[in-house]
Image (tube, rainbow, N blue to C red):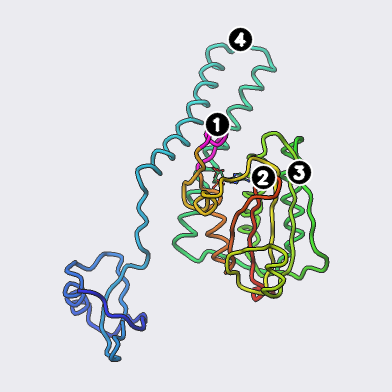
Amino acid sequence: MSIPHGHISNSGDTAHKADKARIHRLLTGMDVPDNAVPQVYTDKDGLPVTYTATRTPEKKVRPDEISVLWHEILSPLTVIKGYVSTLLELDSAINKDQKKQYLQGIESASNRVIRLLENLRDITRLEETDSLITRRISLVELLRQIVFEVQSQTSKHVIKITPSLHLPLVKADPEKIEQVLSNLLSNAVKYSPQGGDVEVEVRTVNNEEQLSELYGETPQVKLPCFIVSVIDTGVGIPEEELERIFERFYRVDNKLIRSTPGAGLGLYICRLIIEAHGGNIWAGNGPGGGGVFRFSLPLDRIA
Ligand code: ADP
């Protein structure tokens, strides 16, 4: 039996628990789940129908996602174990510089596992709760800070910011927006292995006309808004993969990507964060073939 369409409202008091369980069984043929939330649906004739639904639909982890996870956890741990065993066995035979090199290898492999686990923790939080802590922030200030951090990790790239003048403050979660900017900029560097320029652009867009004039075809974004673009000169993204790269654990399957560490979670996290702010995120390729990532933050969030 299908659930009637109509308005849904939370109501814990309207029916006795046993009645709800009975009606639930009647409607679905199933027992009430432990994490059930009591709700009242009003059917098309305006009559209340009590039904119980789980608060969050269960998002199953697929077998291919689990194999990415194994790989992403096992490979850095194997590297760490290898370096530690070498250090233990050959301690007196290796010089100070080699020792430093091994320790740096251990540090970077440990960071890779930590990053993965932090990403998984963030996904759980973002998928299940509205975990934004917003305040008035200057997007340009935040950008300068992230650009400085990412720039200090590469000498092969030059990261430039082109902010439009007089940008207003935006009401957003600074840590989360920082995470988005940091993921996009790190990807721009990671997927331009030959080096090159990375351009970061921020603009305010007030209407459809301005939107299509500046960006051509875009997804439907809530206007007015800020649009932040991160443009690189790297390998770019195959056209048919442009939407899929925002899916959980999705990576483009080619030689470069396979040899570059990553679990395909960064862009998924960016999408969860931007959508939680009421914005959109999308990707394309620049005229020179590099990746172009843009996201919007609606101006109605401006304080
Ligand atoms: P990860 O980098 O860990 O694979 P992401 O979710 O950040 O995960 O990215 C998903 C995929 O999107 C990447 O594996 C890569 O194929 C593609 N991608 C992301 N950013 C870029 C970029 N700037 N240029 C080209 N491809 C990119």
Task: Compare residues 53 and 198 and report the one nearer the observer.
Answer: 198
The residue where tag 4 is placed is: 92
Residue located at (58% from left, 37% from top): 111
The residue where tag 3 is placed is: 197
Looking at the image, is mark 3 or mark 1 earlier in the sequence? 3
Alpha-carbon span between mark 1 and mark 2? 20 Å
Query: Magenta segment: does it hold 258?
Result: yes
Nearer the observer: mark 2 or 4; the answer is: 2
Residue located at (36% from left, 80% from top): 10
Report the number of discs: 4
Dot 3 amino acid type: Asp
Dot 1 amino acid type: Ser
Where disc 2 sits, the SS reads loop
Where disc 4 sits, the SS reads helix
Alpha-carbon span between mark 1 and mark 4? 33 Å
Q: Which residues are magenta?
A: 254-263
The residue where tag 1 is placed is: 259
The residue where tag 2 is placed is: 289
Residue located at (66% from left, 17% from top): 98
Mark 4 Cα shell of 10 Å, populated few (<14), some (14-19), many (≥20): few
Nearer the observer: mark 3 or 2; the answer is: 2
